[in-house]
Image (cartoon, rainbow, N blue to C red):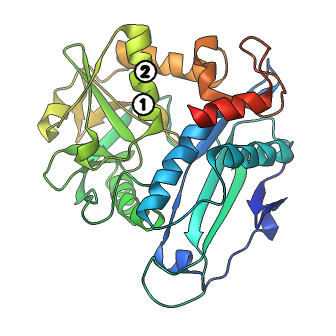
Amino acid sequence: MGKTMAYFRGENVPIEAAKISIMSHGFNYGTGCFEGIRAYWNEEHGELYILHLAEHFRRMAKNSKILFMELPTDIEGLSRIAVDLSRATGFQQDIYLRPTLYKEDEIIGVRLHGLKDAFHIYAAPMGTYVDIQKGLRLGTSSWRRVDDTTVPARAKIIGAYINSALCKTEAVMNGFDEGLFLNQDGHVCEGSAENLFMVRDGVLVTPGVADNILEGITRSSIIEIAERELGLKTVARTIDRTEVYIADELFICGTGAQIAWVSSVDHRDIGNGKLGPITEKIRDIYYRAVHGELPRYHHWLTPVYGTQVKTDGTATFAQVVKQAAAS
């Protein structure tokens, strides 16, 4: 039930009608940025919950500044567009929203200035990006993560994802499930398109934002869960490659990947090679939260079909979007 649709040139249209020119600047030069947003279907509630909607558009606004681009409206307006599109699809299953801001001029010439910006979103069904039921086998990539002085990794820049594609394909062709990036200094950075956490001696550790990582929204959610639910403070610091080998637990995370535990890196078992207790607790709380089952995390969610918030039934949907945009 439902149909894939797009917000394109100011209106919701069937995905088949959302076409751009092969001469567009964004297609030829990768001049644009995007977001990946998940929405989770809760059958019992009869509701589709968009996860961290305003936060994604807030990050997109920051990324667009790096690229000398401007979004067509404010965070509240973008959130309304995304909700209206999601509702128009009629989907009653998990979906994925891909907002993209790009240079649409049909010209030859590499630059960012003096070009017209265009914006669209498409909404389509999405299952798992990686297998979250089994432990993933990671292989350290021969490709290094792009550096902030070259292509800013903290921004979801379209052209930068060739770096991720090279990492992922190399890993799979070498018999692994996923790649592990090192940064230009040789320190652990992230997966091909996921942030990374390790547990060592009861401490949750993740690379810092200066290590050329994407400033992940799921990453922030995990830090919140760890402190609130497990009493664990997360330490953001440099991680060496061999330190990962001797970690007690390791997992990767992201909007697409969600939370996926790692069983081995470079053919070395992580811990006992099984799902660790801290990873399991964080993962289970996260999945309950994103499906709207934990009221204390309802501030993460924007309902698509309902007109009332499910926390206390008093705030209208319009108020929810406005509060999320302002937070």
Q: Is residue 265 above or below residue 147?
A: above
Residue 17 appears in which quarter of the rendering?
A: bottom right
Q: Circle 2 sits on which residue?
A: 224
> Where residue 65 sits in the image (x, y, percent)?
45, 60
Furthest toward the bottom, the residue is 108
Which residue occupies the foreground of this view, 27 or 248? 27
- Going 68% across and 56% down the picture, which residue do you hit? 121
Which residue occupies the foreground of this view, 224 or 176? 224
* Quarter of the image where the N terminus is located: top right
Q: Is residue 268 above or below residue 73?
A: above
- Going 75% across and 17% down the picture, which residue do you hit? 310
- As measured in the structure, the alpha-carbon distance from the residue carrying label 1 to the one carrying label 2 is 6 Å
What type is the residue that disc 2 sits on? Answer: Glu
Q: Circle 1 sits on which residue?
A: 220
Q: Secondary structure at mark 1?
A: helix
Which residue occupies the foreground of this view, 325 or 176? 325
> Where residue 141 sits in the image (x, y, percent)?
26, 54
Horizontal side of residue 99 vs 242, given as left or right = right
* Quarter of the image where the C terminus is located: top right
